[in-house]
Image (cartoon, rainbow, N blue to C red):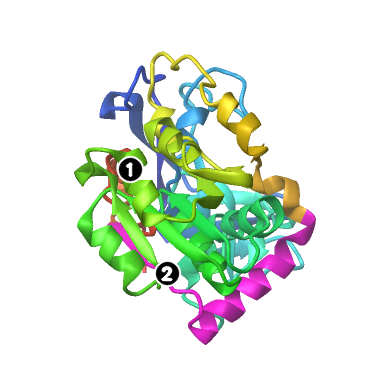
Amino acid sequence: MTDTNRQWHLASRPTGEPTMENFELVEADVPDPGPGEVLVESRYLSVDPYMRGRMRDAESYAEPWDVGEPMKAGVVGEVVESNHPRFESGDMATGELLWAEYATADGDALQPVDPDLAPVSTALGVLGMPGRTAYFGMLDVAEPEPGDTVLISGAAGAVGSVAGQIGKLNGCRVVGIAGAEEKTDWLTGELGFDDAINYKETENLRAAVAEACPEGVDVYYDNVGGPITDAAFANLNEFARVAVCGQISLYNATELPTGPRKLTTLVQKKARVEGFIVSDFQPHFRKATERLAGWVQSGDVQYKETVTEGFENMPDAFFGLFEGVNIGKQLVKVSE
């Protein structure tokens, strides 16, 4: 183990799209775990769209990062030293830790990771926060019924790809919206979506949704917002359910557009729109992870990871989320 611990700090708050000027790579000492704590060496770090909100000094469901302080992420890593009875040196664990090569944490705040269940990286993806977000957003919020048409924006991302497959497992017709032919081919091929729309190659998105969903939309799982959601709302059926998971199209906006604009449609269609945060379902995390793991092991749920090599490339991986370069879960591999 080295004595030097690299960390990424928030150097400044971005205006619009983040740049390298907003990040600072800092060297510090490897920390010693205190009573009840463990020292974790990072193997994989997660980058997620919600982190953009934590770079703002504004009220949100996630506490803002302080300028000059380390940033945080979902991490899966190896326990190097433990002062907690649940963990021993060599165990794999996951939790929200610093953007760092080494970090300490209260052992009660970490979860063990079983390397025999699935690759440890899945603890940050299909078997982690994104997978559970898809699970609860689809089953508890959207409540799909057999025969429903389910439309998913951001469908080739870590959450959308799993949400769509859960829709298929529940007997639904599933249509995904993504931003590249490679992504739409993956959705309709390996993942078994019934249809997919490349919004970047579509002149009239409202018409494209209508064509892909000829019987209308019963469930809309929204990861994106903006014009894509406008097109989805125009095609909602009566008593449709809209699960609002994210609004990535607006995260870098310096001014939010005037809205909401489509409430008339909701009145006409008697539709229900519900935003949710996965942490609200924490008492049920274990059950969700067990079901997701069973689907992965049986092959009913497929997943893909876009892995950026090297801790020094954390910001680049983060930028890629807003450029749409990732398919499935975006991860940074720190070490073997």
Instruction: Work out whether residue 115 can be spotted.
Output: no
Q: Position of residue 267 (x, y in %)?
A: 65, 30
Q: Which mark is residue 303?
A: 2
Please identify, in this view, whether the residue under mark 2 or under mark 1 is nearer the observer: 1
Instruction: Work out whether residue 67 can be spotted.
Output: yes
| Disc 1: which residue | 207
Q: Main secondary structure of the magenta part?
A: helix
Q: Which residue lies most toward the right here?
A: 283
What residue do we see at 41% from left, 19% from top? Answer: 13
Q: Nearer the viewer, residue 134 or 274?
A: 274
Q: Amino acid at mark 2?
A: Tyr
Q: Amino acid at mark 1?
A: Ala
User: Which element type, helix, strand or loop, lies under badge 1?
Assistant: helix
What residue do we see at 68% from left, 50% from top? Answer: 141
Q: Quadrant of residue 303?
A: bottom left
What residue do we see at 28% from left, 24% from top? Answer: 21
Tally the numbered discs. 2
Instruction: Find the magenta span and give its range.
Output: 283-308
Q: CA distance from mark 2 to mark 1?
A: 30 Å
Give the answer, above or below, for where 188 lies relative to 265: below
Give the answer, above or below, for where 29 lies relative to 64: below
Quarter of the C terminus within the rendering: bottom left
User: Which element type, helix, strand or loop, lies under badge 2?
Assistant: loop
- Circles 2 and 1: CB distance less than 8 Å? no
Q: Position of residue 324 (x, y in %)?
A: 29, 45
Crowding near pointer 2: few (<14 within 10 Å), some, many (20+)? Answer: many
